């Protein structure tokens, strides 16, 4: 995703190095325990997690916007004159909105599958 957004390769390598070399140490009853390495990159509370979440969510937002522009996807309206809402992002959470019809459900699934294939976020979370 960072490549698609035009980030420099050096910057991307620095971020990936930070993510892949993290380790944690715990103090239990005043005794430091042996450091351990998590199995999956960043965790909630990591200083970079919010920024990387926003970068990755930009891909999902773009896919939903494109589906909406093509007329395939309709979100919800907060009022008669408001723009349609398909996605809300809060810190490191995402809320999706859609019309409650089968056609739109299939389109949402298609968009999420495409997001998974291109950016691998959902696969990494499993």
Image (cartoon, helix red, strand yellow):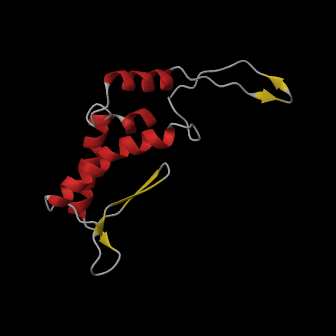
Q: Is residue 40 left or right of residue 121?
A: right
Horizontal and vertical percent position of residue 1: 31, 35
* Looking at the image, residue 115 lies above or below residue 67: above
* Looking at the image, residue 15 lies above or below residue 76: above
| Total count of labels | 0
Q: Is residue 1 left or right of residue 21?
A: left
Viewer-side residue, 102 vs 120: 120
Position of the C terminus, as image quadrant, is top left
> Quadrant of residue 34 in the image?
top right
Q: Is residue 37 left or right of residue 9?
A: right
Q: Would you say residue 35 is visible in this rendering?
A: yes
Q: Would you say residue 126 is visible in this rendering?
A: no
Viewer-side residue, 105 vs 86: 86
| Residue situated furthest bottom in the rendering | 80
Horizontal and vertical percent position of residue 57: 36, 46
Viewer-side residue, 49 vs 94: 49
Q: Residue at x 33, y 46 (%)?
A: 58
> Quadrant of residue 22 in the image?
top right
């Amino acid at each position: 995703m960072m490549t698609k957004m035009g980030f420099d390769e050096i910057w991307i390598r620095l971020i990936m190095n930070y993510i892949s070399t993290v380790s944690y140490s715990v103090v239990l009853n005043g005794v430091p325990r042996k450091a351990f390495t998590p199995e999956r990159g960043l965790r909630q509370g990591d200083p970079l997690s919010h920024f990387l979440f926003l970068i990755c969510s930009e891909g999902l937002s773009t896919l939903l916007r494109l589906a909406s522009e093509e007329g395939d996807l309709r979100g919800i309206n907060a009022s008669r004159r408001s723009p349609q809402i398909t996605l809300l992002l809060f810190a490191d959470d995402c809320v999706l909105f859609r019309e409650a019809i089968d056609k739109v459900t299939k389109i949402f699934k298609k968009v999420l599958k495409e997001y998974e294939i291109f950016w691998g976020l959902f696969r990494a979370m499993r």
